[in-house]
Amino acid sequence: MTKKNKHNWTLPAGTEPTELDKKVMQFQDKGILVPTRNLIKTPEQIEGIRQAGIINTAALDLVEREVKEGMTTAELDKMVHDFIVSQGAIPACLGYEGFPKSCCISINEVVCHGIPSDEEDFWEGDIVNVDITTIFNGYYADASRMFIIGKTSPANEKLVRVAKECLEIGAEAAKPWGLISDIGKAIEKHAKKNGFSVVRDLAGHGTGLEFHEEPEVNHYHDKAKGMLIVPGMVFTIEPMINMGVADIFVDEEDGWTVVTEDEKPSAQWEHTFLVTETGLEILTH
Ligand code: MF3
Ligand code: CO
Ligand code: CO
């Protein structure tokens, strides 16, 4: 049996198709997976996401200024929380599917979803991912960066740098009327060239009106191709790059912390992007 893609793109009854409708439906007729029409953000929604992005970026800038050796991850989380709330916004992580803190802090072999804690502090040489999502007027923006505490090993430095390049190269590969799978293909190539692996079990995602929307953005070369990239879509790219094997496990005790199987370090950078007529625009600069 041949696998047919769903006819996601449907016109509301009585509406004349726009140029965009016609173009998307041409791809759909060729059997390419297209987004649903509601994944295309309106100018008003884009403005809202942009505002959330500005606050989210300021929160990450605060982390950049404040993070230091000896501080606990819970102390840093509190700063992030208080800042976001002071802006009239909401930290999306707090209470999300039961997550107990306002951001994710993931150190060394922790891939992502690390829970800030009074028991854990930053040490010289740590490589740290802080992942923050802000809700402002109902709109979401999601981004993360790596921070190095003091001086780390050359191998760790390279991992952090290559992970950032993977995000940039993935974003560069995404073009309107291309496919979401172009992103992961470019990322995996760059990671492998540098001797690193790409986490396969967690993906980037549409965002903006909800925390996690369609499409799924894989960071490896997904032969299943993925969805058509259409102007007005908003999604994250957030490659997790491992020094050793790609395999991961989730801490059974807390149900959140994602750790590399071989306990070698992992690095991740994330932005929220808007698809424009020419390429991707970062909404979390
Ligand atoms: N910010 C993460 C992402 O990039 C999701 C964190 S969910 C949480 O999608 F509950 F762990 F906060
Ligand atoms: Co994300
Ligand atoms: Co995130």
Image (cartoon, rainbow, N blue to C red):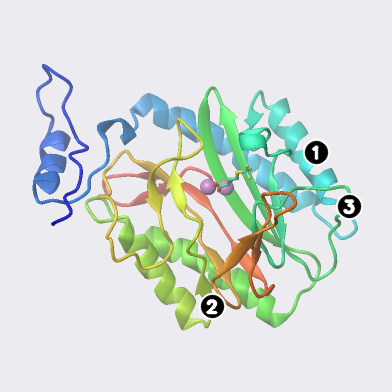
Lateral position of residue 154 relative to residue 23, left or right: right
Who comes first in sequence, dot 2 or dot 1?
1
In this view of the protein, which residue sits in the foreground, 285 or 96?
Answer: 96
- CA distance separating discs 2 and 1: 33 Å
- Residue 78 badge: 1
Which of the 4 image quarters holds residue 162? bottom right
Lateral position of residue 240 relative to residue 115, left or right: left
In this view of the protein, which residue sits in the foreground, 91 or 252?
Answer: 252
In this view of the protein, which residue sits in the foreground, 231 or 201?
Answer: 201
Specify few, some or many for label 2: CA neighbours under 10 Å numbering under 14, 14-19, or 20 or more: many
The residue under the point 46% across, 62% down is 168
- Label 3: which residue? 119
Whether the residues at callouts 2 and 1 have beta carbons within 8 Å, the answer is no
Mark 1: secondary structure: helix
Specify few, some or many for label 1: CA neighbours under 10 Å numbering under 14, 14-19, or 20 or more: some
Mark whose residue sits in front, 2 or 1: 2
Mark whose residue sits in front, 3 or 1: 3
Q: Position of residue 276 (x, y in %)?
A: 31, 44
Callout 2 amino acid: Phe
- Residue 196 badge: 2
Q: Is residue 67 visible?
A: yes
User: Eyeballing the image, is 236 above or below 10?
Assistant: below
User: Eyeballing the image, is 220 above or below 33?
Assistant: below
Who comes first in sequence, dot 2 or dot 3?
3
Callout 1 amino acid: Lys
Callout 3 amino acid: Glu
Who comes first in sequence, dot 3 or dot 1?
1
Q: Is residue 236 visible?
A: no
